[in-house]
Image: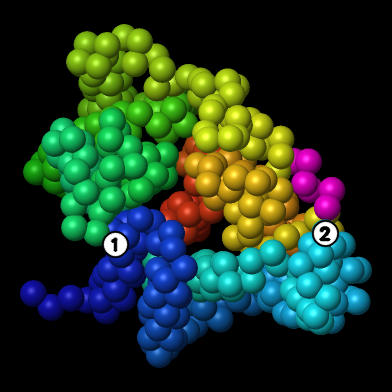
Amino acid sequence: MQLSKNKKYQYLFFFILSLYALFNGGNSNLLIQVNFILISLLFLYCLRNKNYFLHFKNFFLKNKLSISFYLFFILYLIFQIIPLPIEYLQIFSSFKYDYVTKLSDDIFFSSISLQPSNSYFQILNFTSLLILIFILNMIFYTKRHKERIYLFLSIIGFLCSLFAVVIYLNGNPDFLIFQNSYYKNSSTGFFINRTVFAIFLLFCLIASLEFLKGLDRKKVIRNQDNFFLKIYVRLFIIFITLGVITSFSRIGNFLLLITIIFYLINELFIIKSNNKSFRNIILLIIFFDILILGIYFGSSQLFDRFYLLKDDLITTTSSELNLSRVEIIKFSLSELSNFKFFGYGTGSFKTLFMINFDNPNYFYANHSHSDIIEFIGEFGFIGLTLLIASLIKFFLNKESYTFINLILMSYLIIILSFDFALHIPLIQISFIIFFTINKNYSV
């Protein structure tokens, strides 16, 4: 069977997205570099097509102000890693100046970023996100294309969840390059972190539910039944839900609960849908979650999964340090005054932590466990202002406030407040995909 032009480009995009899902969400400097190369090559390949080039040109002209602000944001991140004369560094980062001068008197140049190498790869990542937006607007421009993304996410979510649950039921042994021993009692699959795994599966769950709704509309409007495809997607939903539940991520399961509540309210009170088939899927998720898994895992574990901050307010002991997640957040917040204007550089929180603590070998050292505080610290007031300015058009556009986007905004608020998943490339990409494609499509 010969693929259409659109499918060729879209399947290349799906291949790149699969690599993110397969290799821990693209969360390493090497993978960020590989992903940047692949997505840049795809973008250049798309530009060769005259029709896609016109889509890109149209999108760029309509959003050139937002794109300009984002490009200034990228330039600002580059400025953070440029070695500055030490006398100028005192103006831009007195903390870094004091630290460097204490180390040696022979240092004449240093950057604002506490970890320039990590910041460099984050610049590649943020550039990739902009290129991703261009690609999405070039090759996904109809409802059929949108449904194709949903079906892909449903399939990849099913495969990730199936692998994770099988490995989990076998004691989470390390498998080839996949390290599952970090969470022996949780499903993580291809991911090292269970919360990142659960949040990615939630995007796949939403995609699956929306794809089913699209099939039901086709049945009414075009008299297309798609019986077997519905069966497959419903099976995918069961496994995706099982993956979220057995991750035992409190944030992941809390967001699952919010998702189900949103869908129930929308179906019963907002649109007052008569789609009993779709409503039964929602009820099946609740039944499968609360009753079956509640009996299997015990009622105490059932409720613990939705207890968002359980144990985080209690001091956790590790070697010489006694720190909880909330105390790490407090530390991050207290350090903002030292970097309020120009930040300490993307990917530099671990270095900041190690500078301030004698024993750096602590589990929470990589992230502040509050994305919003960490982003403020990394970018500073100037960088954050540029980033917000590039996004303001999206939030001022009334078409952005669709049902799906409202769910995602609730995700965004909770993740920014209580977790670090928004620093993971695949989660960033998932948000961008849904925010970009959930708009009015041509027929």
Q: Quadrant of the N terminus?
A: bottom left
Sequence-wise, the earlier of marks 1 and 2 is 1
Looking at the rendered structure, the secondary structure element under dot 2 is helix
Is residue 116 or residue 282 the one in the foreground? Answer: 116
Q: Is residue 192 left or right of residue 99?
A: left
Q: Position of residue 413 (x, y in %)?
A: 60, 38
Given the image, on which type of amino acid does mark 1 rest? Ser
Residue at the spot x=71%, y=48% of the render? 356
Is residue 356 or residue 293 the one in the foreground? Answer: 356
Label annotation for residue 95 = 2
Label annotation for residue 390 = none
State the colouring used for the structure image. rainbow
Q: Nearer the viewer, mark 1 or mark 2?
A: 2
- Does the magenta run of residues contain 88? no
Is residue 352 or residue 118 the one in the foreground? Answer: 352
**Above or below, 295 relative to 139:** above
Q: Which span is picked out in magenta?
A: 333-338
The residue at which mark 1 appears reads as 18
Within 10 angstroms of label 1, few (less than 14), some, or many (20 or more) residues?
Answer: some
